[in-house]
Image: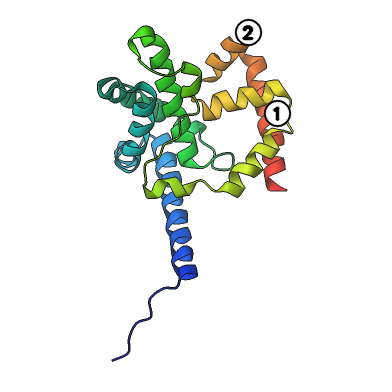
Amino acid sequence: MVACARPTGAGREREAVLHDEEARAELVRLLRAVAAGDRAAHRALYDRTAAKLFGICLRILSDRQDSEDVLQDVYLTIWNKADRFDPAIASPITWLAAIARNRAIDRRRALGSRVAGGELAEADTVPDQSPDALQRLESADETRRLRECLGTLDERARHSIAAAFFGGLTYEEVASRAAVPLGTMKSLIRRGLAKLKGCLET
């Protein structure tokens, strides 16, 4: 009988990378299906990511009921805005986590004095320490490259793209916050995205 060799450390690392790439590709596929109105894909996306996104909400709100309420709003937002997701700009889990943080922070502001402990400004950078496989989907190199390319944009374009694609805001909301006409904001984001994609492809 021939004994099967156990994977070496490097072999296990390669297997983990392959698994992460497959998991990421599946999330991209599900988001695209959600954008096309596929409710089964929306449910599958929920099953794969709800624990992580709930953890983000809970760390910001420190209340289970409030976090559950926000989580429902998060997935409604995902349903309505899945067509905004672009895998060339962010990993799926980064995009999803940004929506969860944004909605949880909005709820925390609305709750005001009901929320105990910590400064609101700290909530935006609350890390999710859940030890699940989804954490490994964010590549350090990808994040660094994205930040470098975002840095090539002018400040207004950079903030507008971050708010629309990472913060989960609509173009209307971004335009309102910047106090500019909707058409102007759409043109600004379109030009910024073209420049950003060009940078990421080089």
Residue 165 in picture, x, y percent from top left: 54, 29
Inspect the image, locate mark 2, and give the three-letter code of the amino acid beneath it. Ala
Please name the residue that numbered disc 2 is placed on: 179
Which residue extends farthest left?
Answer: 65
Instruction: Assess disc 1: are there few (<14), some (14-19) or many (≥20) residues with their C-alpha within 10 Å of its C-alpha.
Output: few
Residue 11 in picture, x, y percent from top left: 46, 70
Inspect the image, locate mark 1, and give the three-letter code of the amino acid beneath it. Arg
Instruction: Assess disc 2: are there few (<14), some (14-19) or many (≥20) residues with their C-alpha within 10 Å of its C-alpha.
Output: few
Disc 2 on helix, strand or loop? loop
Residue 48 in picture, x, y percent from top left: 33, 43
Numbered label attached to residue 162: none
Q: How is the image coloured?
A: rainbow
Cα gap from disc 2 to disc 1, whole angstroms: 19 Å
148 sits to left or right of 39: right
Q: Quadrant of residue 42?
A: top left
Q: Is residue 52 visible?
A: yes
Foreground mark, 2 or 1, reads: 2
Q: Quadrant of residue 54?
A: top left
Where is 53 relative to 2, above or below? Answer: above
Please name the residue that numbered disc 1 is placed on: 191
Q: Image quadrant for the N terminus?
A: bottom left
Where is 120 relative to 40, above or below? Answer: above
Residue 136 in picture, x, y percent from top left: 46, 49
22 sits to left or right of 65: right
* Residue at the spot 51% in from the left edge and 18% down from the top edge: 121
- The numbered mark, 2 or 1, whose residue comes first in the sequence reads 2
Where is 65 relative to 12, above or below? Answer: above
Q: Nearer the viewer, residue 112 or 29?
A: 112
48 sits to left or right of 123: left
* Residue at the spot 68% in from the left edge and 24% down from the top edge: 157
Q: Is residue 169 visible?
A: no
